[in-house]
Amino acid sequence: MKLGVLIKEGPYMHQAMDTAYNFIVAAMELGHEITGIFFYNDGVYNRCSTLEPPRDERNIMKLLSELELKGVRLIVCVAAGKRRGIVNQTVCKVEEISGLGQLLELCITSDRMITF
Amino acid sequence: MSEQEKTKVMFVCRTAPYGTVYEQEAIEAMVMFGAYEQDISVSFIGDGVFSLKKGQDTSLLGKKNFSMTYPILIDDFEISHIYVEKESLEERGMSGEDLMTEVEIVDRNLLKQKMNEMKALLPF
């Protein structure tokens, strides 16, 4: 099944990103395709390149970058990002910043959209 | 594009308008989605119904009164339907007369059916 993921909450304050990560890993292990992860609202903070949690804590930014290395598309909303200071200089990868049209595209190309 | 080819997407607005940014960013997404010629609906449930209340004045909040966009969503931004859940209105002592624009007031069961027809639901 093709699964699109929408993340609306930022890291650490809410469990949303952690649950989403576990969901995505489990779904991929079962052979499902993740069409993309779209970061909206405070979710854009998950892709802030200056996140630096204590070393003995999970590093959400790195976990996401590992997913990206496995071919998962990560998309940070440009408008939500600008509002929160997540711009070219502060996002993990400049190519990830894109518009809301990408969220609609995920809705169109995925069998299911899952929101966290 | 024929009706069959259009993707049906519904925004599900669940939060009151100004305590969080969800509603404001939801409406920004609605406006964008409208430009892509798909079949986009918006529904208001729970505290989301407060977003449509008449006479909103945000001047003391220092926030944009984005509610002015709701009445023009259908005509100017190509949104197909605006649904409001009847039970949510009633639970809050409200009726269609309290709302700033004409909407389709539907009961919980009918809204559930409409949701089942969607390809994707986007909760805010």
Image (cartoon, rainbow, N blue to C red):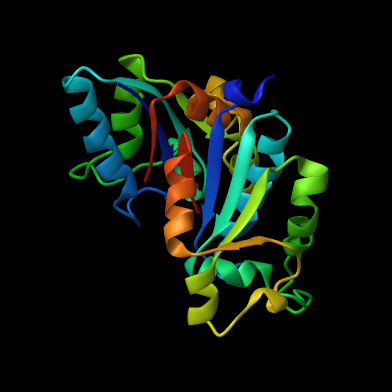
* Location of residue B35 by image quarter: top right
| Circle count | 0
- Whether residue A8 is visible, yes or no, is no
**The one of B116 and A22 positioned closer to us in this rendering:** B116
**Residue A88 horizontal side relative to residue A36, left or right:** right
Q: Residue at x 73, y 57 (%)?
A: B70
Image height check: is B106 above or below B62? Answer: above
* Location of residue A30 by image quarter: top left
| Percent x, y of residue A69 | 33, 15
| Percent x, y of residue B16 | 56, 69
**The one of B36 and A19 positioned closer to us in this rendering:** B36
Q: Residue at x 46, y 37 (%)?
A: B120
| Percent x, y of residue A52 | 35, 42
Q: Residue at x 37, y 46 (%)?
A: A116
* Location of residue B17 by image quarter: bottom right
**Residue A68 horizontal side relative to residue A43, left or right:** left
Image height check: is B124 above or below A48? Answer: below
**Residue B5 horizontal side relative to residue A25, left or right:** right
**Residue A28 horizontal side relative to residue A91, left or right:** left
